[in-house]
């Protein structure tokens, strides 16, 4: 029963992350945090399936996902700080206008 509640929680986290990426586009920091939420939801899903099947591989994958999320946030924050120092804003619409 607990695994099914965790799957509902994972679905809510994924929807929250997708909402943050697709709806609140102007701020790059919110997009970065939303990607972190999606990665956390995937990690939680692996832990729930690991508990359901009495297998440790899901927990190993969860640790791997958390390592990737930590490195992604460190690199992403470094890029954001550099961009903010150069431009003075974290507005993503400015970057989209540079493409065209």
Image (cartoon, helix red, strand yellow):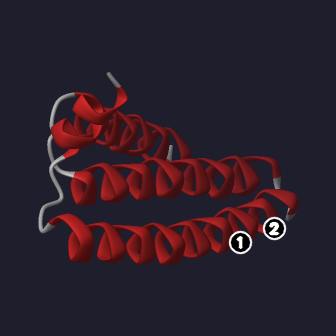
Q: Is residue 88 left or right of residue 77?
A: left
Disc ID at residue 60: 2
User: Which residue position holds label 1?
Assistant: 63
Residue at the spot 42% in from the left edge and 69% down from the top edge: 79
Location of residue 12 (image quadrant): top left
Q: Is residue 80 above or below residue 32?
A: below
Local crowd at mark 2 within 10 Å, few (<14), some, or many (≥20)? some
User: What residue is shown at x 40% (from left), y 38% (from top)?
Assistant: 14
Residue occupying image coordinates x 55% and y 46%: 3
Spot occupied by residue 62 in the image (x, y as percentages of width and height): 69, 63
From the image, which quarter does the C terminus lie in? top left
Q: Residues within 10 Å of mark 1 (few under 14, many from 20)?
A: some
Q: Secondary structure at mark 1?
A: helix
Residue 66, relative to residue 13: is it above or below?
Answer: below
Position of residue 2 in the picture relative to residue 16 (left or right):
right
Residue 49 at x, y = what percent? Answer: 70, 47
Q: Is residue 24 visible?
A: yes
Is disc 2 placed on a helix, strand or loop? helix
Kindly report the distance in space between the C-alpha atoms of the residues bearing marks 1 and 2.
5 Å
Q: Are marks 1 and 2 in contact (CB under 8 Å)?
A: yes
Spot occupied by residue 73 in the image (x, y as percentages of width and height) = 47, 70
């Amino acid at each position: 029963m607990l695994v099914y509640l965790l799957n509902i929680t994972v679905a809510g986290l994924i929807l929250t992350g997708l909402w943050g990426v697709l709806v609140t586009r102007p701020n790059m920091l919110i997009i970065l945090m939303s990607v972190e939420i999606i990665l956390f939801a995937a990690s939680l899903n692996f832990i729930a399936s690991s508990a359901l099947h009495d297998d440790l591989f899901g927990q190993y994958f969860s640790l791997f996902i958390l390592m990737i999320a930590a490195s992604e946030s460190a690199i992403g924050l470094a890029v954001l700080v550099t961009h903010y120092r150069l431009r003075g804003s974290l507005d993503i619409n400015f970057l989209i206008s540079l493409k065209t």
